[in-house]
Amino acid sequence: MNIENLVMKAIDDGDGVLRLAPTWVPRDFLSPGGRLKLAPNDLYALGVERGGIDERWLASTTKADNPGAPEDEGLSYIVIGKGSNLEKILLRDAIDEVGEEIIGKHAVRKYGGWTVLTKFFDNSIPIPFHLHQMEKHAHAVGQEPKPEAYYFPPQLNLNEGKFPYSFLGLNPGTTRDDIKECLKKWDEGDNGILYYSKAYKLKPGAGWLIPAGILHAPGTFVTYEVQKASDVFAMYQSMLEGRPVPRELLVKNVPEDRRSDLDYIVDMIDWEANVDPYFKKHHYIEPKFAENPEETKREGYMEKWIVYASEEFSAKELTVFPESEVIIKDSAAYGLIVIQGHGRIGKFKAEAPSIIRYGELTNDEMFVTAEAAKAGIKITNESSCEDLVILKHFGPGNPETPKTID
């Protein structure tokens, strides 16, 4: 059976809901925090030279830009059938073949496909101070810009890690020459760039919107990150936890003839946004109710926008109360991940696992097609005492997404 027929059968069999396999991604310049439910013995399942597994990518059609990575690293697989009849197909290939049936005609024709990448990342140490290039600089190396947003699920942050703070932006008054001097000292130890930034205490159940061009160093919270589908970045911090950050990570997405041009590298920074004296006001996000909470509570659920104010992506948190069965409608296709509880989503069993072995299939991740989302998905919480909590990630153009932070 060819891909088109197989995917269409899976859509029909699941009434528009597709089951996805876990997608694990290592980073060789970071250290895993061990809170993504991956078995401790499997954190280095790909070998120490590839690095620890500190990320799980969700509903991904984006290949991870990692040295030595296989061609499918970072790409999500649709799981079809079970037992000896089980088959797996890349979500990317399925959307290439029958994208209009999965994400809808409008998304395919206007955006060219599924252009959002969602992930959990979990590190035992902060990530080095870095940015994701704006459109001009990303296009110069054949990449796309990567605005992103963070949400900190309380369920995954009972242990907040050793540094629950994120450095974000630059202090007002910081100049290009200040940052150039830091970059000149790359091989002299700590280049001191964090002296020009401010660390914000991270809050469970809240988040941040970080457009391309903004310098940031995420702390040690487990983070649900929704972003434009790209893996472009530049590290601006030369030392982390006493270990050098390779200069290659500063210039990996810089044109080869500009890699020694500090003026070019400093110009990759969105200066107006970084030195904004009202940075928190313009980037900090608290959840917003998607509907009247008093009405939805009577029906057995509550739903909040947790990522919004972006044209590129959005996300919701859905809580279904114990022993409740609800029909949830949305205006666009979405990926989802179950982070608490158990029950059913459409025809599929749904549960948040306590531990996952590398390569093991789970019942916590799915993709809902545009048509099924609009028709409504039946979701049942089978617990008598625990909420069923689901995070839902959308691509660009969801008409229901709140447009502003305030």
Image (spheres, rainbow, N blue to C red):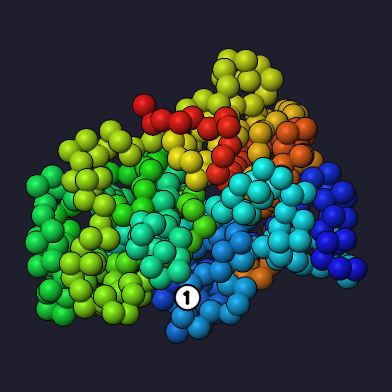
Q: Residues within 10 Å of mark 1 (few under 14, many from 20)?
A: some
Residue 44 on image: x %, y %: 50, 76
User: Where, quadrant-wise, is the N terminus in this rendering?
Assistant: bottom right
Please state which amino acid type lies under the numbered disc 1: Asn
Asked whether residue 333 is in view, the answer is no
Residue marked by disc 1: 66
Residue 270 on image: x %, y %: 26, 52
Asked whether residue 269 is in view, the answer is yes
Residue occupying image coordinates x 11% and y 52%: 174
User: Where, quadrant-wise, is the C terminus in this rendering?
Assistant: top left
Residue occupying image coordinates x 67% and y 24%: 300
Residue occupying image coordinates x 56% and y 54%: 115
Q: Give the camera-side residue of 47 and 187.
A: 187
Q: Give the camera-side residue of 123 and 28.
A: 28
Residue 231 on image: x %, y %: 46, 64
Residue occupying image coordinates x 69% and y 20%: 299
